[in-house]
């Protein structure tokens, strides 16, 4: 008896089961993919809403902070103005005063004429008629009209501590933008040239009365930020050291236009590393190189086409602990007797060199200049041989006699006249006027050394 073959209930031999399974798998995959897409879209929408809500919260908080800052700034300004007014009232009520009566009463309409008329009389009176009165309080600045309006008189007070006879920029100076002076040099006509931290107006030229004559911008490379060093003046040129570009830049003294640059980074001749202090004398340029621990001297010459060229002359000092060697030279000045005065930073001391670089004497060293801090920054020399050093940490200016002893300390921290906030550059003009860059207070204060130093 033969058995019948069993009937196969699957349809694999016809391909039906395989196709059906593939179709079912595809549909399930698409369904899962759609569900995943919907879930992602839903969560993404929730995230967008959350971020928008958070953004609105942050913007609202920023507005509140800006409003609080504006209110606090207004309160601080009002408080400062009231304190200044109170200080002025107390100062003028407590001082021994001398009044100068005027022929005509002071009015707002005649203010400019009145002040111009009194200017020369006041200075002459201060220098000749009252030599025991060392300085004039609050003169040739914005506060003078207030006192004239209140009293109708010019007031003179004893300068103890010393007070400036001129403070600028003032209302008539013509300075419309920010002015944060870093370094200053005065020419033979007592015009003043400043390095200013205000971006785009780094060179500023003022007349002896503090009136702005012109401004100029420092040349940049690829619009990068620049770190200003110092400046020096020749008869017709301005030399500016740019520390982070490791070069000197030359500008026309009249127009303040850029002419060319000198040097590149390095340790060889005519190469610099973080140049800071500058000085110019007898067609020689003296450059303090902070990182190379030396002063490099370049000679200025003219070729047949009257083009300026600069040749290496010699080095002064190098990195060494031996007394007289230079370490982090900060500022340099050329005295009337052609001595090279170099100020060290950090451990402050002053080295005096001959014209060829031979060490003559040293003031301080190994913390011997106890009056100065590590903030000793700028140095200059008075016409009688005084050495004057600014100290931005102590907010003071020190005057040293020829023996290296402090004979006068000017300033102290504050915004009142005669006080400083981070003073930096200093210079003395031909009239023996000390000009101080009061950097933190965004102003310049001028003192007459002949009346300040008794």
Image (cartoon, grey):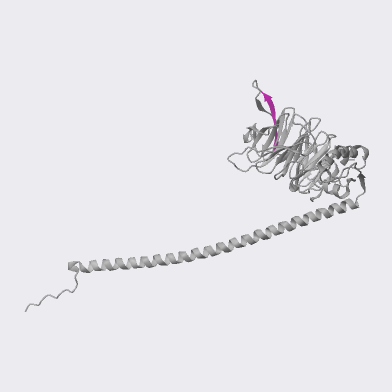
Determine whether, in the image, residue 180 is placed left or right of residue 381: left
Q: Residue 284 falls in which quadrant of the image?
A: top right
Secondary structure character of the magenta stretch overall = strand
User: Going 65% across and 25% down the picture, which residue do you hit?
Assistant: 307
In the image shown, does 9 or 429 lie closer to the viewer? 429
Q: Residue furthest front?
A: 109
Q: Residue 30 falls in which quadrant of the image?
A: bottom left
Above/below status of 443 relative to 264? below
Q: Which residues are magenta?
A: 293-302
In the picture, which quadrant includes the C terminus? top right
Determine whether, in the image, residue 360 is placed left or right of residue 13: right
Query: Which x, y percent locates residue 367?
Result: 79, 45
Tell how many labels. Answer: 0
In the image shown, does 409 or 178 lie closer to the viewer? 178
Query: Which x, y percent locates residue 219?
Result: 63, 37
Tell whether position 114 is magenta. Answer: no
Tell whether position 298 is magenta. Answer: yes
Query: Which x, y percent locates residue 259?
Result: 64, 31
Q: Residue furthest bottom?
A: 1
Q: Residue 31 falls in which quadrant of the image?
A: bottom left
Query: Which x, y percent locates residue 315?
Result: 70, 32
In the picture, which quadrant includes the N terminus? bottom left
Q: Kindly tell me whether residue 325 is visible in this rendering.
A: no
Determine whether, in the image, residue 249 is placed left or right of residue 436: left
User: Going 61% across and 39% down the picture, which residue do you hit?
Assistant: 220
């Amino acid at each position: 008896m033969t058995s019948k073959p069993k009937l196969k209930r699957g349809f694999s031999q016809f391909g039906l089961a395989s196709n059906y399974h593939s179709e079912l798998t595809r549909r399930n995959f698409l369904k899962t993919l759609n569900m995943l897409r919907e879930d992602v879209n839903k969560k993404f929408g929730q995230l967008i809403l959350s971020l928008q809500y958070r953004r609105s919260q942050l913007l609202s908080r920023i507005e509140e902070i800006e409003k609080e800052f504006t209110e606090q700034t207004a309160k601080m300004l009002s408080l400062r103005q009231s304190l200044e007014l109170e200080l002025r009232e107390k100062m003028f009520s407590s001082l021994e005063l001398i009044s100068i009566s005027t022929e005509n009463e002071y009015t707002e309409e005649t203010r400019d004429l009145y002040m111009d008329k009194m200017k020369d009389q006041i200075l002459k009176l201060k220098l000749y008629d009252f030599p025991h009165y060392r300085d004039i309080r609050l003169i040739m600045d914005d506060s003078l009209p207030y006192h004239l309006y209140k009293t109708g008189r010019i007031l003179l007070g004893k300068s103890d501590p010393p007070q400036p006879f001129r403070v600028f920029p003032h209302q008539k100076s013509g300075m419309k933008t920010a002015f944060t002076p870093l370094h200053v040099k005065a020419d033979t006509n007592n015009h003043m040239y400043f390095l200013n931290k205000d971006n785009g107006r780094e060179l500023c030229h003022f007349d002896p009365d503090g009136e702005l004559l012109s401004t100029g911008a420092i040349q940049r490379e690829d619009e990068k930020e620049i770190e200003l060093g110092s400046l020096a003046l020749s008869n017709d040129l301005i030399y500016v050291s740019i520390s982070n570009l490791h070069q000197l830049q030359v500008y026309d003294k009249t127009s303040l236009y850029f002419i060319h640059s000198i040097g590149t980074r390095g340790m060889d001749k005519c190469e610099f590393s973080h140049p800071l202090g500058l000085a110019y004398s007898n067609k020689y340029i003296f450059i303090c190189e902070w990182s190379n621990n030396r002063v490099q001297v370049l000679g200025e010459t003219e070729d047949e086409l009257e083009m300026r060229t600069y040749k290496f002359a010699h080095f002064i000092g190098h990195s060494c602990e031996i007394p007289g060697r230079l370490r982090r030279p900060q500022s340099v000045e050329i005295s009337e007797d052609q001595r090279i005065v170099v100020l060290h930073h950090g451990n402050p001391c002053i080295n005096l060199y001959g014209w060829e670089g031979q060490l003559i004497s040293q003031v301080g060293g190994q913390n011997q200049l106890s009056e100065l801090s590590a903030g000793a920054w700028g140095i200059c020399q008075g016409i009688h041989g005084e050495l004057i050093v600014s100290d931005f940490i102590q907010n003071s200016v020190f005057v040293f006699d020829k023996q290296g002893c402090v004979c006068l300390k000017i300033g102290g921290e504050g915004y009142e006249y005669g006080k400083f906030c981070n003073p930096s550059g200093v210079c003395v003009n031909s009239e023996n006027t000390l000009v101080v860059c009061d950097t933190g207070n965004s102003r310049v204060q001028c003192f007459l050394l002949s009346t300040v130093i008794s």
